Image (spheres, helix red, strand yellow):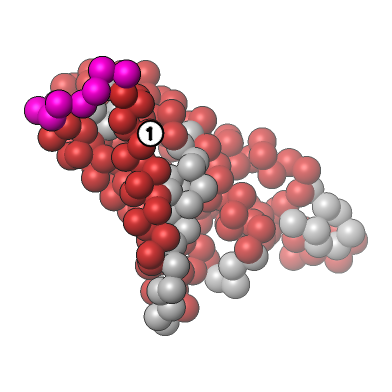
Amino acid sequence: MEALNIFVKSIFVDNMIFAYFLGMCSFLAVSKNVKTAIGLGVAVIFVLGITLPINYLMDKYLLSPGALSWISPDLANVDLSFLSFIIFIAVIASFVQLVEMVVEKYSPSLYSSLGIFLPLIAVNCAILGASLFMQQRAFPSLGIATCYGLGSGVGWFLAIVSIAAIREKITYSNVPKPLQGLGITFIIAGLMAIAFMGFMGINI
């Protein structure tokens, strides 16, 4: 039940876009059409779903204070937490490279439409942010950390696909010239963030 609660909360309450505004660069740049947004959203879910559990294990058995005691009692006082950023980013970059190669091989059109923003998942602050939140919140098990990673990815996917659908419709609307483009997009993102605040009472 706790895993389900964290999964649902990470989608609606702790949404990476609407609660923390992480990953806004690719969120704004790639949300011009639904097809491209779906492709990037699925890639983010995959990367978060794989890298967050790995980073959890890295933190639990390598980086946190006393984590190396399983190797030897003499290493119980070793604290490698200062390496967290480097290790987390290395894991994320490795799997983003894997995703990039797979997308390029099996869907060249999607790879072309995503352009530079696919490799930029490696520096997407939503991806690193999820790992840092995982470390900060000290989840008790790998399963719960995995649920949090998948939920965060689904939340990011939901956010980018939703705004992409709205932006496609807006092209047929009479938007005032000063607000066209990113202006109206920021306003929509703000309104969606306010709407998502209505989910703050969720507690399964």
Query: Is residue 132 visible in the rendered structure shown here?
Result: yes
Above or below 37: residue 135: below
Question: In this picture, which residue range is highlighted in magenta?
Answer: 171-178
136 left or right of 158 in image: right
136 left or right of 42 in image: right
Nearer to the camera, 195 or 60: 195
Above or below 13: residue 167: above
Nearer to the camera, 120 or 72: 120
The spot of residue 29 in percent (x, y) is 34, 25
Q: Which residue is mark 1?
A: 186
The residue lying at 40 percent from left, 80 percent from top is 204
The residue lying at 29 percent from left, 50 percent from top is 158
Say what amino acid the circle numbered 1 marks.
Phe
Above or below 188: residue 64: below
- Say whether residue 1 is magenta: no
155 left or right of 56 in image: left
The residue lying at 58 percent from left, 36 percent from top is 89
- Which quarter of the figure is the N terminus placed in? bottom left
The residue lying at 16 percent from left, 22 percent from top is 109
Nearer to the camera, 66 or 11: 11
The spot of residue 6 in percent (x, y) is 45, 69
